[in-house]
Image (cartoon, rainbow, N blue to C red):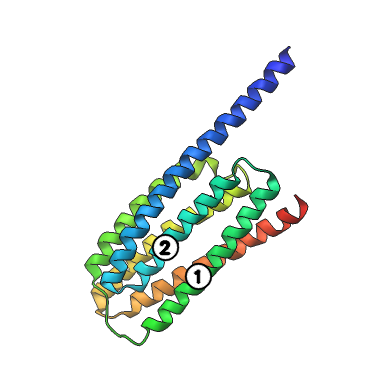
Amino acid sequence: MDDCCASKGCELERLAMRDGQRHVLQIVMAINAALFVIEFSAGLIAGSAALMADSVDMLGDALVYALSLYALSRSDRWKAGAALAKGGFILLLGCAVLADIAIKLGSGVPPPSDIMLIFGGLALAGNLTCLRLLWRFRDKDLNMASTFECSRNDVLANLGVLVAAGGVALTRSPWPDLVVGALIAVLFLRSAARVIGAAWPALKTA
């Protein structure tokens, strides 16, 4: 009887944790989707490579969270496959951002630093909220660990946008914006390597 009750208790705890993960992922997915629309529009208006890179990251994360939700109640093999797909998508985003920066290199026009500060700060507030929500699930499994990795990268990228805005304001040059955009792209590539490096062996052994 005691073993039975203990088993039921563990199962209920596991289901409650899964429901908690699902609820948090739904919230952070909605936050990132909304921030993508807002920051992408601001990036287009300002012509900022850093804002555009950060907004593309938001879109990627919204899709990443959707994949995480899909894999949440599935097997370890599904979770490893979802993590591998996330790593591939992050890699694609990094390459896309680098291509956008290469196109902007010839313009020589600095973006408005005030727009970068406002929308970079808004994105930072949103991603800090996501990071706080995901914190307790960061070591739960490979699926949630890769999701937390994406959210942590977002915070670093947002800080980079604010640094770029300060650099543009001080120098009246587009170079701080382009440099930070490139660094965000490098962050994507590094994160993709980490996620793929963890997911591939897990997929083979699952």
| Location of residue 122 by image quarter | bottom left
In x, y percent, where is residue 66? 51, 50
**Left or right position of 26 against 202:** left
**Residue placed at 24% from the left, 70% from the top?**
113
Give residue 63's mark.
none
Of callouts 2 and 1, the N-terminal one: 1
Q: Which residue is mark 1?
A: 94
Which residue type does callout 2 highlight? Ala
In x, y percent, where is residue 201? 73, 57
Give residue 157's mark.
2
In x, y percent, where is residue 131? 44, 48
For this orientation, the residue located farthest to the bottom is 106
14 relative to 98, above or below: above
**Residue placed at 66% from the left, 21% from the top?**
8
**Residue placed at 22% from the left, 66% from the top?**
114
Using the image as rendered, state which of residue 163 and residue 99 is in the foreground: 99
Determine whether the residue tagged by mark 1 lies in a helix, strand or loop.
Answer: helix
Q: How many marks?
A: 2
Report if residue 154 is visible in the image: yes
